[in-house]
Image (spheres, rainbow, N blue to C red):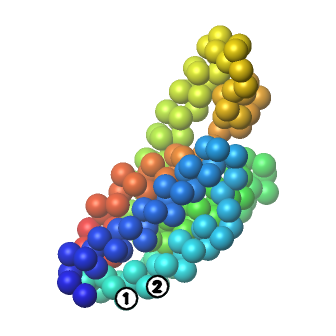
C-alpha cells in the first residue's frame, strides 16, 4: 500500500468514529458502545498500516489509565459512560505523549460547548415548534462533541502518522 494512502486510511480510522460519536451524542445524548469498540479495535489494524514503529505498551497504558480515571468520574456521576469509553478509545490512538494536550483541548472544547449551549438555551427560540433535545433548558451537555473536537484537533499529532 502506498504511504500516502496508508496515512489517509489511518487518519480516517481515527476521525470517522470520532465524528460519528459527536453526531450521535449531539442528536440523542448517547454514544453507542459498538462505535467506541470499533474505534478501539481499529487501532491494531491502523498500527500495522502505520509507516512508523508503534509503542504499543504506552498506547494501551494511556487508554487504560484514562478509562480507569473516567470510570471513577462515572461512578461519582460526573461523566457519562459513553464519554468515558470514547475518551479512552481516542487516548489509545493518541498515546501517552499527547495525553496532556488531548485533555486540555477536550476541557477547553467542553467549556466552549457548555457556554454556547447555555447561551442558546437562554434565547427565546422555539416558540413556533419543537426544539432539538440539545436546546432544552434541562438537557445535559453532549460531551462527546468536546471529546471528538479534541481528537480532531490533534489528528496531525497521531503517533501512527509519524506525528
> At 35% across and 57% down in the image, what residue appears?
154
- Quarter of the N terminus within the rendering: bottom left
> At 33% across and 85% down in the image, what residue appears?
49
Image spot of residue 136 (x, y percent)? 72, 27
> At 64% across and 15% down in the image, what residue appears?
125
Q: Residues within 10 Å of mark 1 (few under 14, many from 20)?
A: some
Q: Residues within 10 Å of mark 2 (few under 14, many from 20)?
A: some
Q: Does the CB distance between marks 1 and 2 fall below 8 Å?
A: yes
Q: Name the residue at the front extreme.
A: 128
Q: Please, is residue 34 above or below residue 48 in the view?
A: above
155 or 64: nearer the viewer: 155
In the rendered structure, the answer to whether residue 116 lies left or right of residue 34 reads: left
Q: Which quadrant holds residue 88? A: bottom right
In the rendered structure, the answer to whether residue 70 lies left or right of residue 111 reads: right
Which numbered marker is on residue 105? none
> At 63% across and 49% down in the image, what residue appears?
25
Which numbered marker is on residue 48? 1
In the rendered structure, the answer to whether residue 154 lies left or right of residue 80 reads: left
Visible in this render: residue 123? Answer: yes
**What residue is pinned by disc 2?**
44
Q: Secondary structure at mark 1?
A: helix
Q: Secondary structure at mark 2?
A: helix
Image spot of residue 110 (x, y percent)? 54, 40
Q: Please, is residue 1 above or below residue 103 in the view?
A: below
Amino acid at each position: 500500500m502506498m504511504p500516502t494512502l496508508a496515512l489517509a486510511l489511518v487518519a480516517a480510522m481515527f476521525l470517522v468514529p470520532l465524528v460519528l460519536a459527536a453526531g450521535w451524542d449531539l442528536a440523542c445524548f448517547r454514544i453507542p458502545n459498538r462505535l467506541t469498540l470499533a474505534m478501539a479495535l481499529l487501532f491494531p489494524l491502523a498500527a500495522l498500516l502505520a509507516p512508523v514503529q508503534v509503542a504499543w505498551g504506552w498506547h494501551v497504558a494511556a487508554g487504560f489509565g484514562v478509562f480507569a480515571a473516567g470510570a471513577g468520574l462515572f461512578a461519582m456521576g460526573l461523566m457519562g459512560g459513553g464519554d468515558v469509553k470514547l475518551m479512552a478509545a481516542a487516548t489509545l490512538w493518541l498515546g501517552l505523549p499527547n495525553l496532556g494536550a488531548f485533555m486540555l483541548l477536550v476541557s477547553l472544547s467542553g467549556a466552549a460547548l457548555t457556554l454556547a449551549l447555555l447561551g442558546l438555551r437562554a434565547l427565546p427560540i422555539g416558540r413556533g415548534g419543537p426544539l432539538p433535545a440539545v436546546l432544552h433548558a434541562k438537557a445535559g451537555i453532549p460531551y462527546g462533541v468536546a471529546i471528538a473536537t479534541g481528537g480532531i484537533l490533534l489528528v496531525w499529532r497521531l503517533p501512527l502518522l509519524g506525528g
